[in-house]
Amino acid sequence: MKVLLLTLTILLSLSANSQNEKSELYLTKESDTTFWKNYQTEKIKDFKLPKLNSESQFVFRTWNPGSMLEITKNNDSISGKITYFVFEVWGNDSKADTFVKTYFLQKSNSENLYKYILNSGIQKIPSDKYIKDWQQGFDGITHIYELKENNTYSFKNFWTPKAQKGITEAEFIIDFNKKISEIGELEKYGKDFFEKVPFISYKYSGSAYSIIKPITKKELREYKRERKKKKRNKNKR
């Protein structure tokens, strides 16, 4: 009953996502609407990310620990963007600040990604809890996919495909992720983002560990001064 109520709540929230929405979205039966949907919603709130636009004809979004790729089609217009996000870790505060940056994909890459996703067969792969022998664990990376085609909506998650042995669907997901990265030329955006992260210590959403940049004592003193200045300005608002 709790799962049913949660599913209905999600469907209602999707239906009310836009004040101008004219149609209801129907969740596919092989989707997963429990834990990972709440986890994704928390990311949207923490990093002030856009919710899925239910007015678009086609929307594909793939979520990783520190990024969200979105391909959208409206009439004959196809666009793509990828957003990266991290938390600053400072002292005992693992969410001291956030850094978010969005990159818009080249038109040709967005169009090629749309064609690939549409014809890839990802629509036929069920969420991992419906796949026989798919293992779960506490460490690893969970890939989340959202796909809206007209009034049909799917929300699926896959825990660490590389940890699955002899599962055809896991091999498909690994290859699917690789091709998306190649077609969209995503590596260059990720590299640029991490070069621009202004924090000396940061972490991905949901990660148990932080990444620390090597800096000198002088740079650390300057960083502390900048943090204090930023905090004062923030308190004045």
Image (cartoon, rainbow, N blue to C red):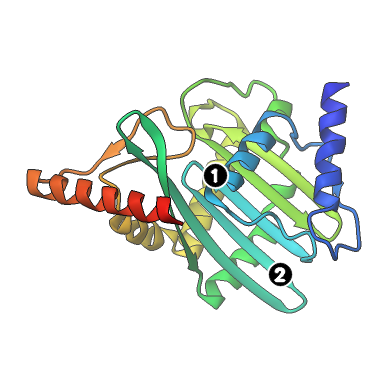
In the current view of this chain or complex, which residue is farthest to the front?
Answer: 236
Q: Which is nearer the eye, 94 or 53?
A: 94
Residue 199 lies, in percent from the top left, at 30, 48
| Mark 1, residue position | 46
Query: Label 2: how many residues lie within 10 Å, few (<14), some (14-19) or many (20+)?
Result: some
Q: Which is nearer the eye, 191 or 111?
A: 191
Residue 220 lies, in percent from the top left, at 15, 45
Q: Which is nearer the eye, 83 or 225?
A: 225
Residue appearing at x 80%, y 40% in the figure: 10
Which tag, 1 or 2, sits closer to the chain's start?
1
Q: What element carries label 2?
A: strand
Q: What element carries label 1?
A: helix
Residue type beneath disc 1: Asp
Of the two numbered discs 1 and 2 in the rendering, the one whose residue sits closer to the viewer: 1
Q: Could you tell whether 24 is left or right of 187 in the image?
A: right
Query: Label 1: how many residues lie within 10 Å, few (<14), some (14-19) or many (20+)?
Result: some
Residue appearing at x 46%, y 46% in the figure: 66
Residue 110 lies, in percent from the top left, at 58, 70
Count of picture labels: 2
| Mark 2, residue position | 73
In 3D space, how far apart are the residues under numbered discs 1 and 2 (Cα atoms)? 27 Å
Which quarter of the figure has residue 90? Answer: top left
Which quarter of the figure has residue 30? Answer: top right
Residue type beneath disc 2: Lys
Residue 184 lies, in percent from the top left, at 50, 64
In the current view of this chain or complex, which residue is farthest to the right?
Answer: 23
Residue appearing at x 59%, y 50% in the figure: 62
